[in-house]
Image (tube, rainbow, N blue to C red):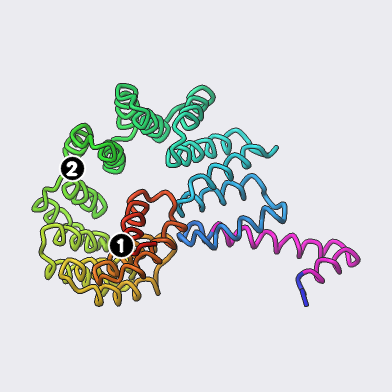
Amino acid sequence: MNTKKIGCILAVGMGVTLLAGCGSEKKNIYKQAEENLEQGNYQEALEGYEASISNGYKPTESFRGAGIARLRMGDSEGAVDAFTKALGTDKAGKSLRQDILSYRATAELQAGLEDDAMADCQTLASDYSMNADTYFLTGSVALAMDGYDEAASNFQQAYGEKLDYAMALQIYEAYEARDMEADGTRYLEAVLENAPKNARDYYERGHIYYCMEDYDNAKKELTKAADKGSAQAELLLGTVCLAQGDTAAARSMYQDYLNLEDSSKAPGYNGMALCDLADGDPDSALANIASGLESAETNEMQELLFNEIAAYEKKLDFSTAYAKAQEYVKMYPDDKEAQKELVFLKSRTGE
């Protein structure tokens, strides 16, 4: 028996109080979706936003939330559709419209729809004041379209608006994705001239040195961040040690991270699994991945699931690896590396 449905039917005959109760339930569904999105539980967030859409509750915001959830889950085409529907509602105010246009351009870029993404960027430039994020977005789209001078101009504007570590890294990663690391490295070198003030700054500096493959300086900065209480620094220290081929030191760092009370366990177990794979122990890797998946939020699952495929491949269990890869690609359709892996595994299984 559907008691919720009966409750709403009874409200029609019992007046405003119970009607408010039904409205309150719709509000609670939406608020829970917001919380799930913030916490990285994207599947649960998507389900909540879709329920809110069906309920007709905050349709613009619900389509927007569904789009963000899909974007975070790697479904860029589904995200574009959701953002387009959000913009098509009659309650998309100017500031909310700006936000949704930015998200849609990001999704379009990820989906390979560069012309559409640039059209949205041009709308943002003509209808709104540009800021660091919109300059960066426009630069990223221009770079994808081989507009190198336009990209450089927009990136310079973005960095000029936001002279911080995060922006420098974003620009570097945009160039790195196009095999143009040298163009991005100058932003990293420039931001390193800033004096660090707190644990977050030391962590960001360590991350930058790691990207530059200057592992000694990365360790120095990350150790300072860890001493100041940065859990993320412990995690990245493990990654730096792993990059140097020192799996014993990496394991120690990942274990230190797992021992922290407030740490999210999934990344630590993923690090342990990477050490296992480097040491040629896929069975131990699978055990650590299983432990990681037990505690993982939605946004922490992707790397674990990808490494699970690698572990089965290391075991020469190509049939299981292929099945896992098929599941993975359905979940993360934008992952081009996984698509290549799927083709390889298919050739090994004779599918």
Is 318 inside the magenta-drawn segment?
Answer: no
Question: What's drawn in magenta, residue-wise?
Answer: 5-34
Name the mark on residue 195.
2
Q: Nearer the viewer, residue 53 or 231?
A: 53
Point 51% across, 52% down: residue: 70
Q: Is residue 337 left or right of residue 97?
A: left
Q: Residue 195: horizontal and vertical position, in percent?
A: 18, 42
Q: Percent position (x, y) of residue 33?
A: 57, 59
Q: Disc 1 vs disc 2: Cβ atoms closer than 8 Å?
A: no
Q: Name, please, the residue furthest toward the right.
A: 13
- Residue 165 at x, y percent in the picture: 26, 42
Q: Residue furthest front?
A: 350
Q: Which residue is mark 1?
A: 348
Identify the residue at image location x=53%, y=35%. 101
Q: Secondary structure at mark 2?
A: loop
Q: Disc 1 and disc 2: Cα gap in Å?
A: 52 Å
Residue at screen point 70% across, 64% down = 25
